[in-house]
Amino acid sequence: MIKIGLTGWGDHDSLYEDLSNKKDKLKAYAAHFPTVELDATYYAIQPQRNIEKWIRETPNNFKFVVKIHQALTGHAEITDFASGKVELFNLFKDSMAPLKASGKLAMILVQFPPWFDLQPQNINYLRYVREQLKDFDVCIEFRNRTWFKDDVKEYTLEFLTEMKFIHSVCDEPQSGEGSIPFINRITHDVAFVRYHGRNVNGWTKKDMTDQEWRDVRYLYDYNEAELKELSDKVKILNHKAKDIYVVFNNNSGGHAAQNAKTYQKLLDIKYEGLAPKQLKLF
């Protein structure tokens, strides 16, 4: 089963043109797609009331791909959020308990930064992550090309398989060491595919402010030929994986939702069990 979704549900305006109450965005989103990447967890440990609200607002078969807290992947300092790694991991795991119990947790996404390269210290940290999250399905996304150099690519994939990690298949700008190639392989019976767009000029921060970078980094509109190419590749994975989660992250310009709809049409997928769409009164 290929489950298509988007990164977050807040910014996809084309899905909410007839929505009168902005608080109902997740309900409206769940009428279009069966899965979403939850990124609020990257910025802060979410209170249980938020998790329980999101569970209530989605259909029984809806799934969340949850991005792990930024300090656990080296994007921020641990001490800004907890006394140490163990405490922050425990806080994160406790916050995930209701989602896991509901059956709506697809996986934990652990996305490392471009400076997380292939070296023994980082391999050991991956082992530590696996131990800390031993009760969860975990996806690893690298942003450093050293993990997939020709002479080590197979070792990396073998290591991910051994650790029971899901390999994040990424379509992203090819901008040197801080990007990874598209590797259409699975390391688990669940697959995860993430489409970031192909905006090479916006991929690295350079001299931009944080806001300027957010505005351009994922600014890309896949054309139909590109979506056909990508959909053909996911069909290959569909012969090998039990479930495939596909997330469009190219939303700096609001293109993700329509790209996902076109992609779904190309794959001739019709979802059942989505949330009911809101009725238009006029």
Image (cartoon, grey):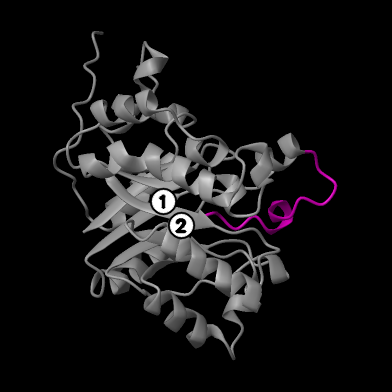
Give residue 203's quadrant in the image. bottom right
- Is residue 204 on the magenta stretch? yes
For this view, does 98 lie left or right of residue 148?
left
Query: Can residue 263 be seen in the rendering of this structure?
Result: yes
**Circle 2 sits on which residue?**
194
Q: Of label 1 and label 2, which has the lower sequence position?
A: 2
Tell me the SS state at disc 2.
strand
On the picture, is 172 further left or further right than 41?
A: right
Work out whether residue 85 or residue 71 is closer to the camera in this orientation and state it: 85
Q: What range of the chain is rendered magenta?
A: 196-209
Q: Amino acid at mark 1?
A: Val
Q: Which residue occupies the foreground of this view, 15 or 125?
A: 125
Q: Which residue is mark 1?
A: 247
Q: Are marks 1 and 2 in contact (CB under 8 Å)?
A: yes
Q: What amino acid type is highlighted by mark number 2?
A: Arg
Q: For the point 30% across and 74% down, which residue is it? A: 236
Percent coordinates x, y for residue 160 in the rendering: 43, 75
Q: Is residue 134 left or right of residue 74?
A: left
* Residue at far right of view: 207
Residue at the image point whose x is 71% and y is 51% from the top:
202
